[in-house]
């Protein structure tokens, strides 16, 4: 009676699925007591297992359309749902020491094969789509999309419509969420410039530490070498009555990468027109931080001490303002020597050299075209001319004189190639530059635009000081402001695609978002030039022919 009563009670509780585990334990205990009921107990085990399976699968049954009738976006959701349910239902495999890896299915309508990877570190693939299931991979895709949106200034509305047409793209609301999260962390690292000015800045020490850390990882042999930091600034005219000034830096150790905007980093964005007073007022927190770094000449990154060496680069207008000198049309407009405007044409005559202490002394007396004290106490041999603006401003003079023969002169073309080279010859450049200025003055009989007084500060710098800089640093291409100019262009595009409610911060946040996500952008395929003759001569002839055909 006792055995029968116990079995009756258990069979009556059998339908309570939540208790099936306890029932199994009770039956195990009963097994020890009842040796004569093996068949009955075995049947009960099977019934309990079937009931448990039936109950757990009721919530897994598909209540919607079959797979082949779903849209592409819905198929991705269903595949993810099937994958998660399969992992849950196959939990028992681990009791055998096995881990399910792949679930292969076949669609009933098209007989196409679907392969669902059940592990979190692999992809789930099918004949029509690829879906990454892990949170890290999903966020990586979102950050990649955000980088492209920032880099090419794609509007949110356009991306939303594009994601509706192409369901494989990340959803627009997910992009906005990632952007909001990234902005929240970046805003805590940005600060307002002193009132009443409008602008934002960030700590150059933090940015510099991050870039040095990245540089050290890619160049293990960097330890023990100087980290060469070039400070630059440039004004950007966004509209007829709106000007912004961008203060940035780059690491010269990166060599040719300094020409890319990706390796030029914005420190401050200020709404203002360029003047010495405005630079001193708005950039005072940043300049104080730079002065501390210049004074210590070292920085601690990841437990390693790196020696720092600072340089100043930019166009002539920025350099003159930054060092407290007058405009480029002043009498003593040269930063490096005291050549008067009337003697700029005479490249063979030596003039007294300037130094930072002389400029500081002249600032008190307002002599030799010095109007203010320099914003940074930097040695003048660490102030390097920008080859980009050097040739742009000289070309402006030549084009203004409407004598195209001068532009096409072989001497000037060779001079341009020599100075722009990564391995120039300083003595050859000096000889060619002096000869070019002599030829320039010789044309004074043809036009008034070629008088001795027409020799500009840029021409004087090219013939006298550029060869000295090349002899000192090997080349001046590494100090080029091409990356800075492209950074300004990106900032301008960012302004016109923003809400313009707080443009300075939007520009800085966009640049910092791109800096934080640029490591995820795809690597461009390498291209090998097979026909050197075409790239040196043939391409020029092709472009010239194209211009001629477009005018006919």
Image (tube, grey):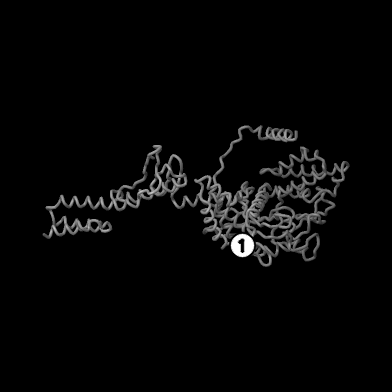
**Quadrant location, the N terminus:** bottom left
Of 95 and 279, which appears nearest the observer? 95
Residue under pointer 1: 296
Query: Does residue 416 sit above or below 489 in this rendering?
Result: above
Q: Residue at point 13% right, 57% down?
A: 4
Residue 196 place in picture, x, y as percent? 68, 67
Query: Does residue 518 sit above or below 105 in this rendering?
Result: below
Describe residue 338's horizontal placement relative to residue 209 as left or right: right
Residue 241 place in picture, x, y as percent? 73, 57
Q: Dot 1, how many residues are within 10 Å of its Cα: few (below 14), some (14-19), or many (20+)? A: few
The furthest residue to the right: 445
Of 345 and 454, which appears nearest the observer? 454
Mark 1 element type: helix
Residue 51 place in picture, x, y as percent? 26, 52
Query: Does residue 535 sit above or below 89 in this rendering?
Result: above
Question: In terms of image quadrants, where is residue 441?
Answer: top right
Q: Residue at point 75% right, 57% down?
A: 320
Describe residue 417's horizontal placement relative to residue 530 as left or right: right
Of 195 and 443, which appears nearest the observer? 195
Of 76 and 177, which appears nearest the observer? 76
Residue 259 place in picture, x, y as percent? 64, 48
**Quadrant location, the C terminus:** top right
């Amino acid at each position: 009676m006792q055995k029968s009563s116990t079995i009756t009670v258990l069979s009556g509780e059998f339908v309570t699925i939540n208790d099936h585990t306890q029932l199994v334990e009770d039956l195990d205990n009963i097994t020890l007591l009842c040796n004569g009921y093996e068949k009955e107990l075995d049947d009960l085990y099977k019934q309990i297992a079937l009931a448990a399976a039936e109950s757990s699968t009721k919530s897994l049954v598909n209540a919607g359309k079959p797979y082949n009738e779903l849209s592409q976006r819905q198929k991705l959701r269903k595949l993810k749902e099937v994958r998660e349910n399969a992992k849950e239902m196959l939990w028992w495999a681990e009791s055998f020491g096995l881990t399910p890896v792949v679930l292969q299915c076949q669609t009933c309508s098209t007989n196409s094969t679907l392969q669902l990877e059940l592990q979190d570190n692999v992809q789930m693939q099918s004949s029509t789509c690829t879906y990454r299931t892990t949170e890290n991979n999903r966020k990586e895709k979102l950050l990649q999309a955000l980088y492209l949106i920032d880099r090419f200034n794609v509007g949110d509305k356009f991306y939303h419509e594009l994601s509706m047409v192409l369901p494989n793209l990340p959803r627009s609301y997910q992009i906005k969420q990632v952007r909001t999260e990234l902005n929240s962390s970046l805003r805590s690292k940005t600060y307002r410039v002193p009132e009443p000015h409008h602008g934002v800045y960030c700590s150059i020490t933090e940015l510099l530490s991050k870039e040095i850390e990245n540089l050290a990882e890619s160049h293990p042999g960097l330890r023990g070498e100087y980290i060469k930091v070039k400070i630059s600034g440039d004004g950007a005219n966004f509209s007829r009555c709106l000007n912004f000034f961008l203060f940035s830096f780059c690491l010269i150790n990166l060599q040719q990468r300094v020409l890319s905007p990706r390796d030029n980093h914005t420190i401050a964005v200020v709404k203002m027109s360029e003047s010495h007073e405005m630079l001193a007022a708005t950039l005072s927190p940043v300049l104080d931080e730079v002065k501390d770094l210049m004074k210590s000449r070292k920085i601690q990154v990841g437990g390693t001490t790196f020696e720092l060496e600072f340089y100043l680069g930019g166009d002539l207008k920025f350099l003159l303002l930054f060092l407290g000198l007058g405009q480029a049309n002043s009498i003593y407009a040269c930063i490096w020597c005291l050549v008067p405007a009337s003697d700029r044409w005479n490249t063979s005559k030596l003039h007294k050299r300037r130094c930072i202490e002389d400029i500081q002394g002249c600032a008190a007396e307002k002599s030799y075209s010095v109007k203010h004290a320099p914003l940074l106490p930097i040695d003048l041999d660490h102030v390097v001319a920008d080859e980009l603006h050097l040739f742009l401003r000289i070309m402006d003079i030549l084009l203004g004189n409407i004598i195209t023969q001068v532009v096409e002169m072989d001497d000037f073309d060779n001079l341009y190639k020599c100075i722009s080279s990564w391995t120039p010859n300083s003595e050859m450049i000096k000889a060619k530059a002096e000869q070019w200025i002599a030829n320039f003055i010789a044309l004074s009989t043809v036009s008034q635009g070629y008088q001795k007084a027409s020799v500009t500060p840029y021409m004087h710098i090219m013939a006298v000081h550029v060869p000295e800089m090349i002899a000192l640093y090997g080349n001046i291409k590494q100090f080029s402001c091409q990356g800075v100019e492209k950074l300004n262009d990106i900032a301008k595009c960012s302004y016109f695609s923003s809400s313009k409610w707080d443009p300075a911060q939007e520009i800085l946040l966009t640049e910092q978002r791109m800096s934080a996500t640029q490591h995820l952008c795809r690597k461009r395929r390498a291209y090998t030039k097979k026909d050197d003759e075409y790239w040196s001569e043939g391409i020029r002839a092709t472009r010239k022919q194209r211009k001629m055909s477009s005018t006919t």
